[in-house]
Image (tube, rainbow, N blue to C red):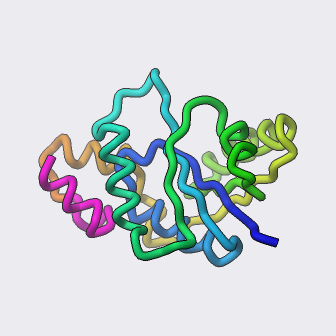
Amino acid sequence: MNRKALFAGSFDPFTIGHESIVTHALGIADEVLIGIGVNDKKKYLFSLDDRMKMIKELYADNPRVTVKTYNGLTVDFARENNVSFLVRGVRTTAEFDFEKTIADINRRLSGIDTVLLITTPEVSCVSSSSVRELMSFGHDVKEWVPETIYKYIINK
């Protein structure tokens, strides 16, 4: 049985924390689908096309990772793509409470479970919003994003 995990987010930009979650998810799933969600209420630093290109390039050599974009509810996207379970990263206890609530709602709506993966200590402080903020102050974010993503950032 092929177990496919969905790791969904806006990934603006994709960080070493996200990369760590994908690596851990590959340890429990046969395949990981990275779903880049579109939220019209959010203002993004990188276009949807750029985020898609960056992440696809990062995983170009890994046939177990695919990348797609979607609109709407994550669980609807998961069902459309025959996902076995959702994967979410958790950095703090506050995030755990939030993610548990979302996981409960998603399970109720779809029957699809969520696996919460605790981040490793070295990436627990990394988030897309912190990377964007550092960038806004001209800080070099090389240590916070994968090398492939960094190439896009320095050309922005």
Q: Position of residue 58 (x, y in %)?
A: 37, 66
Q: Residue at x 77, y 58 (%)?
A: 84
- 152 on left or right of 54: left
Occupied quadrant, residue 132:
top left
Residue at point 23%, 48% (across, down): 134
Q: Main secondary structure of the magenta part?
A: helix
> The N terminus is located in which quarter?
bottom right
In the image, taking residue 154 as reference, residue 108 lies left or right, namely right
Residue 147 x %, y %: 27, 69
**Is residue 16 placed above or below 77 in the rendered structure?**
below
Most extreme residue toward the top is 41
Give the vertical position of 33 relative to 77 (above or below): below
Query: Is residue 105 on the magenta stretch?
Result: no
Q: Magenta stretch?
A: 141-156
Name the residue nearer the viewer: 118 or 93.
Answer: 118
User: How many labels were placed on the picture?
Assistant: 0
- Locate residue 88: give its quadrant: bottom right
Q: Position of residue 42 (x, y in %)?
A: 42, 27
The residue sitting at 16% across, 53% down in the picture is: 139
- Residue name at image x 72 percent, y 40 percent: 75
Q: In this orientation, which residue lies closer to the viewer: 125 or 75? A: 75
Q: Position of residue 30 (x, y in %)?
A: 68, 73
- Nearest the viewer among 90 and 58 is 58
